[in-house]
Image (cartoon, rainbow, N blue to C red):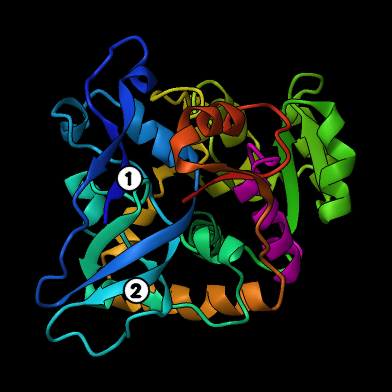
Amino acid sequence: MSNRAVVLQKWVANDPDAGLALVTKHVPKAEPGQVVVHIILRPVNPTDLLSLRTPGNAHAKDGSFTPGSEGVGIVHEVGEGVTTVLKGQRVVPFVQVENLRKGQGTWQEYVAVRGDLVWVVPDSISDVAAAQFVINPWTVHGMLSDLQIPKGEYVLQTAAGSALGRQLIKLAKHWDIKTINLVRRKEQKEELKALGADEVIATNDEDVVTRVKEITGGKLAYGALDAVAGELTKQVCASVRDGGQVFVYGVLAGWDATVGVGDLFRGVHLAAWRLYGELLIPERRRVFIHDVSKLIEDKIIEPNAGETYDLANFQLAIKKSEEVGRGGKVYLKN
């Protein structure tokens, strides 16, 4: 039995993706307290590509790094002392807690994880939804909860056409929070409004701050979520109320973010939001599992599924995942 895996074999400074290769590794054995999961489906997330392309990644230069931040699979082997799962059960392994620090993500057929870091997926949740159970839904739930936006107030978000952005639109609507959604292309406006977006601003054609003032009657947005960073962060900060909170959770425009000093004087608070820290806390994991699984079962949060590629075609999957208007999350299967 073999374990196909995508591995970053060498670091290519100007094109990190070029150092990736499909290799065959040994299937891991379940040590005491561990479970080996046969991954059957995993998404291509922006965070996966970021991890591949970040020079500071310690595993990116030693030929051992396998990306993949989430996925769904079948329990292949149960180690001594594990009583919470059985061989053959469908599970989501929380590889974000330990495996990714070791460079052992889900872009391989088999992963070994701690027995307490797998969740048995109920029959009511599909493979497609289970495969992206963690990264986007937990981030949306966590960030929107932490903003503590009163019902009827506005949250502003960038990259609103992304899979995460679409889930935020639906969850905010479910929680009676209004959304102002920033996209680059005006062609996305009607699509997002049909999904439940209250307002959509095309940043290529409209002045963001002016439009937010018009939409809110001068009150500005209560808080904001920014996946882009760069110069856009300055417009986001200028679009929230005095004392408002802005969470930066992505770096689509790079690792720098600009903020106006005048907005700092207004008490606008700019901070990073990372799911990783939340995942380390067992109590937080239990809350996310309970709340998000219910939201998925009730179809409040739904996967925006796109094309699926065999693991061997990972380069095509990466390319497709970065296409504008690709039509949904790209998956890798065995």
Location of mark 1 (residue): 4
Which element is circle 2 on? strand
Q: As drawn, which residue projects farthest toward the bottom?
A: 83
The answer to whether residue 217 is seen in the rendering is no
Callout 2–callout 1 Cβ contact below 8 Å:
no
Q: Earlier in the sequence, mark 2 or mark 1?
A: 1
**Viewed as shown, does residue 253 lie left or right of 16?**
right
Give the magenta-colored segment's residue range. Answer: 152-175
Question: Rounded to the nearest whole Å, what is the CA distance between mark 2 and mark 1?
Answer: 17 Å
**Closer mark to the observer between disc 2 and disc 1:** 1
Residue named by callout 2 = 75
Residue 215, horizontal then vertical, whole percent: 83, 43
Q: Which of 192 and 178 is in front in this view?
A: 192
Circle 2: residue type: Val
- Of residues 151 and 228, the one nearer the viewer is 228
Q: In this view, does 56 lie above or below 304?
A: above
Q: Please indicate whether residue 307 sits to the left or right of residue 60 in the image.
A: right
Q: Does the magenta stretch include residue 160?
A: yes
